[in-house]
Image (tube, grey):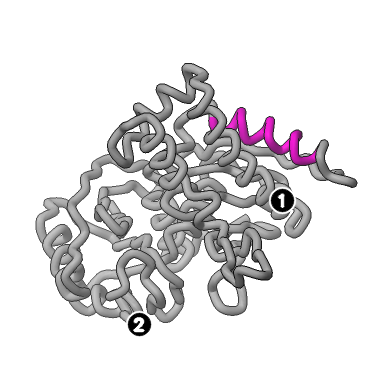
Amino acid sequence: MFLVIDIGGTYLKYGLATIDGKIVQNSKLKTPKANYQALIEQIVAIYNGLNVQIKGLAISAPGTVDTKEGQIFYGGALPYLHKQNMKNDLADRLSIHVSIENDGKCAALAEYWKGATAGYSNSIVLVLGTGVGGGIIVNDRLLRGAHLGAGELSFVVDRFPYKQKRARMVGRSCSATQMVNQIAMQKGLPENAGERVFDYINKGDHEALESFKIYCSHIAVQILNLQYILDPNIIAIGGGISEQSILIDEIIKQIEVVKQASEFSMANPKVTPCKFKNNANLVGALYQHLLEYQGLVMS
């Protein structure tokens, strides 16, 4: 068995996985907010509490990750991860092989390995949540980029009103959390009431549906941009919101709306939901581990 861990800003999800990518047991704990050492101690405690032999530890983490050196930079919602070498620290404590990869890239690896983009040499996974993460596969290789930041769509500039001198980023305009909370406020619901918000959307409530369509239009624009820049075979949409079937349908509709409003547009992106949903980061972390230590080769 392999221990797989996904470090999120709110929860630390973990599970046991077989070598073929099946998650056979999983759970979650609140992610320590205090400091880096508290996180390390929590992971060590999880490992020590297992009653099975562990062949390796595979980690999905926020921030820019140097997979070879094991160092993390700019830890997203967990700033204390900046410049920490979690790979070496845990390998020293546990005396096992440890791998670590960025969470969005893990999602892309999972879908490429056994998910929605399997069988395609060129693919993109977009993970819609508080921001927009993701990963890019080009010619059957994960694209990390010169500075390890490829796929971080949140930081793409959506627009820049010249007079105001304040850029709007894709992480805001395409934030699923922001869209849900906007509709929740319109309907007098508490924040993060995702299921209740989608009840309004699925029932065709005019106000909620309009906000939702605008959101999907923003996603459609970025998908078309990515299609022209990278020309992937397929683009898969992940994150909790992707479990809502209306999302993919509306994004596809909005792609056509944007194309019809464009002076010249040839792109026909293939858009699909991710397969692994909330387990994508765990499965992708395992795949990265197998690539590093088990002689597995991307093909």
Disc 2: which residue: 83
| Picture quadrant of residue 279 | top left
Name the spot of residue 13 as percent of width and height, x first: 27, 51
Q: Which badge, 2 or 1, is on the more N-terminal residue?
A: 2
| Magenta span dominant secondary structure | helix
Name the spot of residue 269 as percent of width and height, x first: 73, 42
Instruction: Say which amino acid is labelled 2.
Output: Lys
Tell me which segment is drawn in magenta. Answer: 247-259
Real-space CA distance between mark 2 and mark 1, rounded to the nearest whole angstrom? 33 Å
Magenta stretch containing residue 3, yes or no? no
Residue found 68% across the figure and 30% down from its top:
253
Disc 1: which residue: 232
The answer to whether one can see residue 224 in this image is yes
| Neighbours of disc 2 within 10 Å: few (<14), some (14-19), many (20+) | some
Residues at discs 2 and 1 in contact (Cβ within 8 Å): no
The answer to whether one can see residue 277 in this image is no
State whether residue 42 is above or below residue 187: below
| Picture quadrant of residue 83 | bottom left
